[in-house]
Image (cartoon, rainbow, N blue to C red):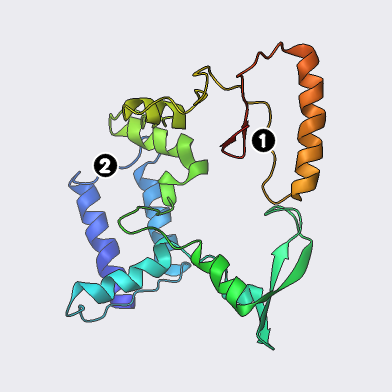
């Protein structure tokens, strides 16, 4: 390790002297020497060089563990007894420190787990380093140093725009009167159907006072026409 570290720092030093590597504008050679000494003495180096894999499948499996984690971390699974799985979760989201536990039958747990499995040929790799979501300013700074423009923000189509581009009939039109449907509210599907019906009737009565709906006008509730 000491030999490898010394040779690498020496190569870097020679490249800087020959101007093959240009130091940042705010760093002089004295500061580089101090940084080099710090890297050579105070910083622990970990280098693991092994023989190459005989095929690419092993490399892919190895890297996949680091590109994207599983749906649930191993330490969150507390027990698996009596055909039930017990695992922990944060009560109020990621920022909360309060934890609780939930018990699920093994079948339900596997069902929830499989919901996170990506469809074939889909891409779902989290960004890291300069491409992490909270490093946009650092990324723009690095790109400007190399004379590159900022990364263009990707524009996403709404589901209405996507349907129009596919040449299909507009999904917001009523199939009976062909008038445009009015989105009143979104009601979570996990609520009790009777509670949903009562809440929808109350909201409908209030909205009737504000909007003069004619016969044939409709609303979208949970993806269905009403």
**Circle number at residue 186:** 1
Q: Secondary structure at mark 1?
A: loop
Residue 199 placement: quadrant: top right
The image position of residue 152, as x and y in percent, is 36, 29
Eyeballing the image, is 216 above or below 49? above
Toward the viewer: 133 or 125?
125
Q: Taking the image as drawn, is residue 158 in sight?
A: no
Instruction: Identify the residue at the far bottom of this view.
Output: 82
Point 77% across, 65% down: residue: 99
The image position of residue 8, as x and y in percent, is 27, 65
Toward the viewer: 94 or 22?
94
Image check: 119 left or right of 191?
left
Upstream in sequence: badge 2 or badge 1: 2
Toward the viewer: 129 or 42?
129
In the rendered image, the quadrant that contains the C terminus is top right
Residue 113 placement: quadrant: bottom right
Crowding at mark 1 (Cα within 10 Å: few <14, some 14-19, many 20+):
few
Q: Which residue is mark 2?
A: 22
Point 81% across, 23% down: residue: 205
The image position of residue 43, as x and y in percent, is 46, 67
């Amino acid at each position: 390790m000491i030999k490898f570290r010394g040779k690498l720092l020496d190569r870097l030093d020679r490249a800087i002297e020959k101007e093959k590597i240009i130091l940042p504008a705010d760093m002089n050679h004295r500061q580089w020497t101090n940084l080099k000494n710090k890297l050579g003495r105070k910083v622990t180096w970990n280098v693991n060089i092994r023989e190459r894999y005989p095929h690419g499948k092993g490399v892919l499996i190895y890297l996949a563990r680091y590109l994207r984690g599983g749906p649930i971390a191993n330490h969150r699974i507390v027990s698996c007894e009596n055909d039930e799985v017990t695992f922990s979760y944060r009560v109020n989201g990621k920022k909360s420190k309060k934890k609780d536990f939930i018990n699920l039958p093994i079948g339900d747990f596997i069902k929830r787990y499989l919901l996170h499995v990506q469809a074939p040929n889909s891409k779902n790799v989290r960004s890291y380093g300069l491409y992490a979501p909270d490093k946009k300013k650092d990324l723009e700074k690095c790109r400007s140093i190399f004379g590159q423009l900022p990364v263009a923000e990707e524009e996403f189509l709404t589901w209405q725009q996507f349907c129009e581009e596919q040449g299909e009939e507009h999904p917001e039109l009523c199939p009976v009167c062909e008038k445009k449907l009015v989105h009143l509210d979104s009601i979570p599907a996990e609520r009790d159907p009777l509670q949903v019906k009562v809440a929808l009737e109350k909201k409908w009565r209030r909205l009737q006072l504000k909007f003069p709906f004619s016969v044939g006008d409709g609303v979208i509730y949970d993806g269905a026409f009403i």
